[in-house]
């Protein structure tokens, strides 16, 4: 069914945060984490054997009370937990899950975190195959596609684990927005 205007999702209330990947959507509400859309690579964090999820599905094994946010990029997603740890799901062809492999996974955990310092902010964008992590010390790390130098690590080699971004700024980044070929910090 084609939809040419926004529609209200009536069964999900008290929405706290939303994010979108290329063909997937992520919703954090007081009632839980919901996902919908394309799941070709497991980016919805549920195993549907690649089948799309056409109506929002609750991730009933994730306690929303310990989740800070859920974010999506092109074909991957990330759950930032209140303790600073990060779960990752989906496409990993450029290492964007940050787990040290290039294997697509329904779920993995990014570990160990550099210097065992928790993450505060995830930097994402729906057309990106890269992701950025601002830790509690204000350091920025990146992983994934780097063909245009978008990771800011001094070269154009893709990364499959968190690599320190070479920032020459005085202020702590509070927002990172990633695209397919470049990245912006605020």
Image (cartoon, rainbow, N blue to C red):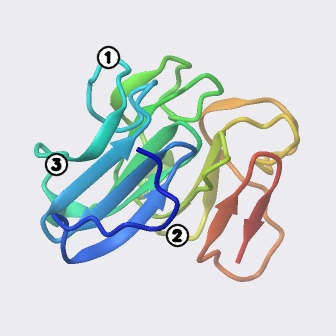
Residue to which mark 2 is pinned: 137
Q: Which mark is residue 11?
A: none
Q: Earlier in the sequence, mark 2 or mark 3?
A: 3
Q: Earlier in the sequence, mark 3 or mark 1?
A: 1
Whole-Å distance between the Cαs marked 3 and 1?
A: 20 Å
> Is residue 50 something one can see in this rendering?
yes
Task: Give the residue at the far bottom of this rendering.
Answer: 171
Mark 2 and mark 1 residues within 8 Å of each other at the beta carbon: no
Q: Earlier in the sequence, mark 2 or mark 1?
A: 1
- Residue 129 x, y percent position in the rendering: 65, 39
Q: Which mark is residue 49?
A: 1
Quarter of the view holding residue 14:
bottom left
Q: Mark 2 packing: few (<14 Cα in 10 Å), some, or many (20+)?
A: few
- Residue 184 x, y percent position in the rendering: 76, 66
- Residue 151 x, y percent position in the rendering: 75, 47
> Is residue 111 something one can see in this rendering?
no
- The residue positioned 32% from the left and 31% from the top of the image is 107
- The residue positioned 52% from the left and 25% from the top of the image is 100
Which quarter of the rendered picture does the N terminus lie within?
A: top left
Residue to which mark 3 is pinned: 62
Q: Nearer the viewer, residue 159 or 37?
A: 37
- Residue 24 x, y percent position in the rendering: 45, 45
Q: Secondary structure at mark 1?
A: loop
Which quarter of the rendered picture does the C terminus lie within?
A: bottom right
Q: Secondary structure at mark 3?
A: loop
């Amino acid at each position: 069914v084609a939809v040419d205007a926004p529609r209200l999702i009536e069964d999900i209330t008290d929405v706290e945060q939303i994010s979108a990947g290329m063909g997937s959507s992520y919703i954090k509400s007081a009632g839980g984490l919901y996902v919908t859309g394309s799941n070709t690579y497991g980016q919805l964090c549920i195993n549907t054997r690649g089948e799309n999820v056409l109506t929002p599905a609750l991730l009933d094994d994730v306690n929303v009370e310990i989740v800070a946010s859920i974010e999506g990029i092109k074909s991957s997603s990330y759950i930032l937990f209140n303790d600073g740890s990060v779960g990752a799901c989906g496409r990993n062809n450029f290492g964007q899950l940050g787990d040290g492999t290039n294997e697509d996974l329904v779920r993995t955990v990014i570990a160990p975190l550099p210097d065992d310092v928790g993450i505060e902010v995830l930097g994402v964008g729906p057309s990106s195959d890269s992701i950025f992590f601002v830790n509690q010390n204000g350091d920025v790390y990146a992983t994934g596609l780097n063909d245009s130098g978008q990771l800011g690590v001094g070269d154009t080699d893709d990364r499959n684990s968190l690599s320190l971004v070479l920032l020459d700024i005085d202020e702590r980044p509070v927002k990172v927005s990633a695209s397919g070929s470049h990245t912006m910090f605020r």
